[in-house]
Image: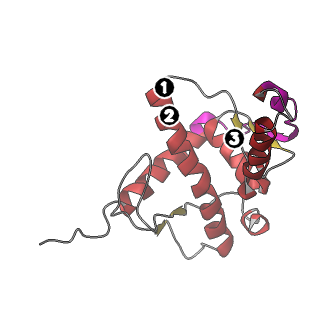
Amino acid sequence: MEALAAGVPDNGGVFFVPAFAGLGAPHWDPYARGTLVGLTRGTTSAHIARAALESIAFQSADVLDAMHRDSGIELKELRVDGGACANNLLMQFQADLLQVPVLRPKVVETTALGAAYLAGLAVGFWNSTDDLADHWRLDRQFDPQRTPAAMAALRTDWRRALERSGGWERKVRA
């Protein structure tokens, strides 16, 4: 999907809201539905692929914004893991969107690694979580490359797409 999405310089005005079971945090709209907006005759499968990848970053940014509003803590960097973080285009877009470095570890399946670390702590293989922190290794850092203004404009369009998906499913009336 990365190669397909990288075939275009941007999403071509296409936005995908993957609200297949409604929208969760921070929007909390169980009646929202998946939406693909901004299609034109010039839209290609690459634009749609890019919009799908970008939707992951937009959703993450929405949650991180809510966390910032609630905590008042400014995000300085984002450490990522899981299969999606292997996608360089997605990680660069996430860094651009958040305007902070995105750090990908050498071991991206940290859920399994975390379980192993907990087991090692439980049996005394490691003495503390401080011992574990020394094992984290950087694979790649993605630094913001696009301007805050350009990313703010995309966030505005993302919010417009969210509005269109919102409340799509009608509530059942008794």
Which dot marks residue 88? none
- Please provide percent x and percent y for residue 23: 42, 57
Q: Amino acid at mark 3?
A: Ala
Q: Which residue is mark 2?
A: 67
Q: Which residue is mark 1?
A: 71
For discs 1 and 3, the disc positioned in front in the rendered view: 1
> Taking 37 as reference, is 153 above or below it?
above
Give me the residue at 65% from left, 36% from top: 147
> Element type at marker 2?
helix
Question: Marks 3 and 2: CB-CB under 8 Å?
Answer: no
Q: Nearer the viewer, residue 94 or 43?
A: 94
Image position of 52 (left or right of 34): right
Question: Residue at 51% of width from left, 43% of height from top?
Answer: 63
Dot 1: within a 10 Å radius of its alpha carbon, few (fewer than 14), some, or many (20 or more) residues? Answer: few
Displayed quadrant of residue 114:
top right
Residue 127 in the image, given as x and y percentages of width and height: 82, 27
Q: Is residue 145 magenta?
A: yes
Quadrant where the N terminus sits is: bottom right
Q: Amino acid at mark 1?
A: Ser
CA distance for labels 3 and 2: 17 Å
Q: Amino acid at mark 2?
A: Met
Mark 3, residue position: 95
102 lies above or below 84: above
Asked whether 100 or 158 is in front, the reply is 100
Residue positioned most to the front = 123
Q: Residue at x 74, y 58 (%)?
A: 83
Q: Secondary structure at mark 1?
A: helix
